[in-house]
């Protein structure tokens, strides 16, 4: 499995984010709000946002890093043709990366965005036993 999170896996253009925000469906977890569009003809693309009103720049940057790490571990099992945007909630800024990962995985599973081969919530799914 490839657990990289390259630029090819990300939503890059404003119109892509706008499409997901305007027409996408929503799933709200305790730490992460998920917006997604299914049925696109492209591969799965993901984006991360943290609103300016919830924290200062340093905390928002940490939040984006935590969210990208959680998505990196889940990306190999996201169904093809899904564009999703993960929006960090204010309560997630105080949570650990593992908690954000578990909340994101639960929301994606609930909405059927993960393939059936997904091994379940496992923080060490990428074989990296040293990261927290």
Image: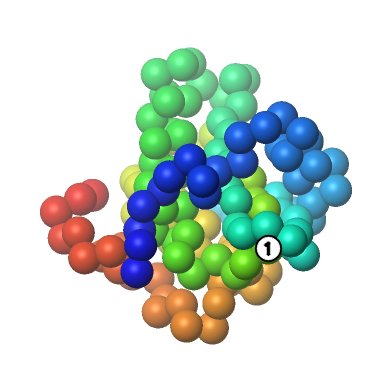
Residue drawn 61% across the image and 41% down it? 11
Visible in this render: residue 21?
A: no
Q: Residue furthest left?
A: 130
Q: Say which residue label 1 marks.
A: 81
Identify the image quadrant of the N terminus.
Answer: bottom left
Query: Percent from the top left, x then y, of residue 60?
Result: 47, 25
How many numbered marks appear?
1
Quadrant of res 94: top left
Left or right for 83, reference 100: right
**108 w.r.t. 95: above or below:** below
Residue 91 placed where, x, y %?
51, 39
Q: How is the image coloured?
A: rainbow
Residue at left 55%, top 77%?
A: 115
> SS class of the residue under badge 1?
loop
Whether 98 is drawn above or below 109: the answer is above
For residue 102, say whether it is visible: yes
Dividing the picture into quadrants, the one containing residue 109 is bottom right
Which quadrant holds residue 114? bottom right
Q: Position of residue 74 (x, y in %)?
A: 45, 61
In the displayed orientation, state which residue is furthest to the right: 23
Q: In the displayed structure, does residue 30 sit left or right of residue 28?
A: left
**Rendered view: 121 above or below 41:** below
How many C-alpha atoms fall within 10 Å of the one at disc 1: few (<14), some, or many (≥20)?
some
Q: Position of residue 21 (x, y in %)?
A: 77, 41
Q: Nearer the viewer, residue 47 or 7?
A: 7
Q: Residue at x 23, y 49 (%)?
A: 132
Q: Residue at (28%, 64%) from the top-left corner?
A: 126
């Amino acid at each position: 499995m490839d657990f990289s999170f390259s630029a090819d896996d990300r939503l890059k253009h404003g119109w892509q984010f706008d499409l997901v925000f305007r027409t996408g469906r929503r799933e709200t977890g305790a730490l992460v709000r998920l917006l997604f569009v299914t049925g696109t003809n492209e591969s799965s693309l993901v984006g991360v946002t943290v609103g300016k009103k919830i924290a200062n720049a340093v905390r928002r940057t940490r939040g984006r890093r935590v969210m990208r790490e959680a998505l990196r571990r889940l990306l190999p099992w996201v169904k093809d043709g899904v564009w999703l945007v993960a929006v960090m909630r204010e309560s997630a800024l105080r949570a650990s990366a593992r908690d954000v990962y578990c909340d994101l995985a639960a929301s994606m599973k609930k909405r059927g965005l993960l393939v059936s081969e997904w091994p379940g919530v496992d923080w060490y799914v990428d074989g990296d036993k040293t990261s927290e």
